Image (spheres, rainbow, N blue to C red):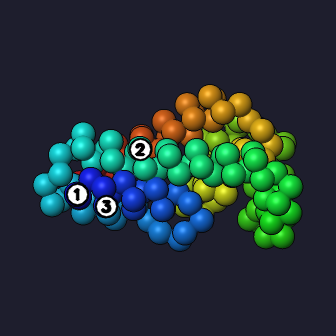
């Protein structure tokens, strides 16, 4: 059951909800969850959410493009996405700007396989490095 809570926390944190899964991840580890279980739960939830963000951007292109251009962060993200393409993905793990960038990746139609490889591996690495400080 703690794995499910961590999964949901990581999933919600990578969507538009202003949540942080890092605290839940560290709490799960300090409560005795093994590192492999915590890594799988948190990473899979986070990767599933950024995948959802990508496909929302891809399939709802017109609607998301309009919403993105109404916010300052969205406008910057869209401009960076069009200008830099895959080079924006290393910033997708950052708080505040990272999750909108995963939506922008779908809007600008980056190749899904490369999106998952780059953005997904960064999500896994973030949790791994976070576990190392504990």
Give the residue at x 56% y 60%: 15
Mark 3 crowdedness (10 Å alpha carbons): few <14, some 14-19, many ≥20: some
Whether residue 63 is visible, yes or no, is yes
Residue 124 position within the rendered picture, expressed as x and y whole percent measured from the top left: 42, 41
Q: Quadrant of residue 113?
A: top right
Q: Mark on residue 1?
A: 1
Mark 2: give few (<14), some (14-19) or many (20+) Cα within 10 Å.
many
Question: Does dot 2 land on a helix, a strand or a loop?
Answer: helix
The CA distance from mark 1 to mark 3 is 7 Å
User: Marks 1 and 3: CB-CB under 8 Å?
Assistant: yes
Is residue 101 among what the camera can see?
Answer: no
Label whose residue precedes the other's in the sequence (3 or 2)? 3
| Gap in angstroms between the C-alphas marked 1 and 2 | 15 Å
Q: Mark 3 points at which residue?
A: 5
Residue lying at 15% horizontally and 60% vertically, measured from the top left: 31
For disc 1, the neighbor class at 10 Å (few under 14, some 14 to 19, many from 20) is few
Q: Disc count in the image?
A: 3
In this view, the residue in front, 73 or 106, is 106
Q: Which quadrant does the N terminus fall into?
A: bottom left
Q: Nearer the viewer, residue 74 or 12?
A: 12
């Amino acid at each position: 059951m703690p794995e499910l809570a961590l999964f949901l926390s990581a999933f919600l944190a990578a969507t538009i909800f202003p949540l942080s899964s890092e605290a839940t991840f560290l709490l799960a580890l300090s409560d005795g969850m093994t590192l492999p279980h915590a890594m799988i739960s948190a990473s899979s939830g986070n990767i599933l959410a950024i995948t959802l963000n990508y496909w929302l951007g891809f399939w709802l292109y017109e609607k998301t493009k309009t919403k993105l251009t109404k916010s300052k962060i969205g406008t910057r993200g869209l401009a960076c996405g069009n200008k830099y393409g895959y080079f924006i993905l290393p910033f997708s793990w950052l708080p505040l700007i990272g999750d909108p960038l995963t939506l922008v990746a779908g809007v600008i139609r980056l190749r899904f396989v490369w999106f998952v490889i780059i953005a997904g591996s960064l999500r896994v690495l973030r949790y791994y490095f976070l576990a190392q400080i504990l």
